[in-house]
Image (cartoon, coloured by chain):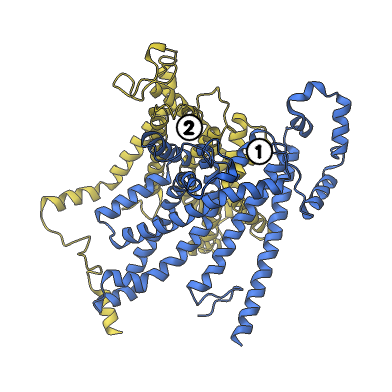
Amino acid sequence: MILMTLIANAPNRSPKGSPNGSPKSSPKSSLKAWRQNNRRQQTITAIAIGSIFLLGIIVSPWFLGESGLTTVLTDRNQPPSWAHLFGTDWLGRDMLRRSLHGLSLSLRVGLLAASISAVIGTGLGLAAGTFGGWVDAVIIWIVDVFFSLPHLVLLILIAFAVGGGTQGVIIAVALTHWTSLARVIRAEVLQLSNADYVQLSRHLGKPSLWIARHHMVPHIVPQLLVGLILLFPHAILHEAALSFVGIGLSPHLPAIGIILAESMRHLSTGYWWLGVMPGVLLLISVKAFDWLGENVRSLLDPKTSQE
Amino acid sequence: MRIKALLIGATIFAAQKLLRLGLLLIAVAVFTFVLLSLSPIDPVKAYIGADMMQISPEQQALIAERWGLDQPIWSRFLDWLGQLLQGNMGTSLVFNQPVSQVIALRFQASLQMLAIAWFLSGLLGLGLGIIAGALQGRWIDRLIRLYAYTLASSPTFWVALLLLIVFAVSFKVAPICCAAPPGVLSGNVTFWQHLHHLLLPAVALSIIGIANITLHTRQKLIDVLHSDYVLFAQAQGESLWNIIRYHGFRNILLPAITLQFASLSELFGGSVLVEQVFAYPGLGEATVQAALRSDIPLLVGIVFFSALFVYTGNTLADLAYPLIDPRIQLGGQRSL
C-alpha cells in the first residue's frame, strides 16, 4: 500500500521522461511558454483561417463567374499545369473552376441540410432532457431505430421516397443527421439539471426561466455550436455520396459528387486528374470543417477555454 | 448449479434479443410504409414506367384496384404486414424475380467482400492502434494518427476511385470492374479470377473501416498504460510489450470488438458506394438500382435486410463479451 502511494506520487509517471519537464532557461522552453500563453490567440487565428478558407470556397462562383467554364476544344484533357492547376476536362473546361463551382454548391446544400438537422436535434434533445418520462423514452427509441439502419441505406430510402433531386438530398440529409446531436444535448440537459449549482438555484427560489438562461444556456450553446460545425462535414460527404450514386442532385448541376461520377467514365483513359483533384479539394474542405469545429470547441468549452 | 444459471441467462438473453428484434422490425415496417405512402411517387406510374402512353386511365385504375390502392392506409398496411410475415416480400421490378431471391443472390456476392474487408480492417486497425498507443507521441504515432484522421474525413467513394486509378489503370494489376472477367459465364469463373476481382473492392472497403478502430484502440491503450496496475508492472520491471501482452490486450479487445461489430452498419453503407465504383454486382449495387429505377419492393426488402444485418452484428458483439471478459454474463447480470 505504501509502495503504491509512493509510486503514484512520484513526479515522473511515465518512464520515457516527463512531457512537462523541469523549467530550463533554454530558448526552446521560452518558445514553449510563449506558445502556451498564446494558445487562445492561436485558436482564434485557426478559426479565422478556417472560416475564411471555407467562406472563400462558398462565394468563389460569384467572383469567378462563368469564365473558364466554356468549351475550349483546343485545350481538351490537359494534365495539371500552371495555367490549369487541376487540368482540363474532355470539353476543355478548367477543372479548378468547375471544382470550385461544384464544391460551393455542395457546401451550400450540406450547410442548409445540416442546419435543419441541428434544429431538429436541438429541439428533440431539449424535449427529451427536460420533459423526461415517456417523451424521453419515445425520442430515445426513435434515435435507436435510426441507428439500426445503415446510414446510407436510410439516406437512399428517404431521398427516393420524397422524389429525389436537390430537395430529396436536403430532406434526406436533414432527417438523418440529428440523432447524435440530440443525444449530446439530452445528456447535457440531464447532467445540468442534476448539477449542484442548479439544484441550489432551485432551492433559492429562482424561476425556471432564470435558471435556464443563466445556468443552462451557457453550457448548451457551445455544445450546439460545435455539434453544428461537426455536422457539416458529415452532411457534405453524404450529399456528395448521394449525388455520386445518382440519387442526389441532378446531373446537370455541377455538384462535386456529379463531377466525381463523371470522372468515372474517363478513368480508364488515364485522365487521373479528373477524379483526383476535385476529391482532394473536397477532402481539404471537410478537414477544414473538422479543424474549425475542434478549435471552436476548445475556445468555447468552459473546461478548456481557460487554458 | 453454474450450468443452470448460465442456461437461464442465455434464455433471458435470447428472449430479450428476439423481443427487441421484433419491435425494431415493426418500427422499420411502419416507418418505411408511412414514408413511401406519403411520397409523391405514384406506384402505378412507377410500375408502368415508359409505357404510360399506351395504358388507358381505366386500366390504370384497374391496376390500382388490383393492388388495393383504393383501400385506407391502415388496411393496406395490415395486408402488407401479413404478406411480409408469410415471407412474401414481393417481386423485384428490375430483376423480375422474387425479392428474397434477389437479396439472397446479391448478398452472397457482397458477403465475401464484406467479410474480407471486415477482418482486414479489424486486424489492421487493432495493430495500428496498439502501435500508436504504445509509442504515444513518437513520429510513428503521429503518422498513424494523421493517416487515421485523414481517412476518417475522406469520402468513401473517392478512396475507392483512387485505388482504381492507381491499381487498375496505372499499374494494371487489378481488374477495372465487375465480379468476373468479361465474356466468361458465371459458372466458369475460377476461384483465382473471383478473388482477383474481389480483392480491390474489399481493400477499399477495409481502408475506410480502419480509422475508427485505430483511434479508439489507441486511446484505450493509452488509458490502460496510465493505470495503476500498469504502473505496478513497470515497477516490477516488466517490459512495454509484455505489459501490453498481459495487461493491455484483453482490456483493449472488448471495446475493439464492440466497435468492429457496430461498424457493420458503416460497412454496409460503404459497400453501396464501393460496389458502385467497382461495378461489383452485390447488394449495394442492387440498392442503388432499386432506388434509381423505382423498384419499391426490392428497396423495402433491402431496408429490412440491412436492419437485420446490423442487428445481427450487435447481437454477435453481445455474445462475444462473456468470452473475452468472464465478469460479464449473458442475460445482463454482471458478477464481480
Q: Specify few, some or many for label 1: CA neighbours under 10 Å numbering under 14, 14-19, or 20 or more.
A: many
Q: Quadrant of residue B93?
A: top right
Residue A208 as seen in the image, left or right of residue B245: right
Residue type, label 1:
Ala
Which residue is rendered at x = 72% and y = 41% of the image? B92
Q: Quadrant of residue B219?
A: bottom left
User: Please, is residue A1 above or below residue B310 in the view?
Assistant: below
Which residue is rendered at x = 39% and y = 32% of the image? A276
Which residue is rendered at x = 76% and y = 33% of the image? B47
Q: Check the residue under mark 1 and report the chain it is in.
A: B
Q: Nearer the viewer, residue B48 or A118?
A: B48
Where residue A131 appears, x then y in whole percent? Answer: 64, 56
Q: Looking at the rendering, in which quadrant would you find the N terminus of chain B? A: bottom right
Residue A242 as seen in the image, left or right of residue B236: right
Residue at which label 2 appears: A107
Q: Is residue B332 visible?
A: yes
- The answer to whether the residue labelled 2 contacts the one labelled 1, judged by CB atoms less than 8 Å apart, is no
User: Please, is residue B141 above or below residue A110 in the view?
Assistant: below
Q: Is residue A210 visible?
A: no
Tell me the SS state at disc 2.
Answer: helix
Chain coloured blue here: B
CA separation in Å, label 2 and label 1:
27 Å
How many numbered markers are drawn?
A: 2
Q: Quadrant of residue B160?
A: top left
Chain A, hue in figure? yellow
Residue type, label 2:
Leu
Q: Nearer the viewer, residue B162 or B327?
A: B162
- Residue with the most extreme front position: B188
Where residue B146 appears, x then y in whole percent? Answer: 33, 48
Residue at which label 1 appears: B290
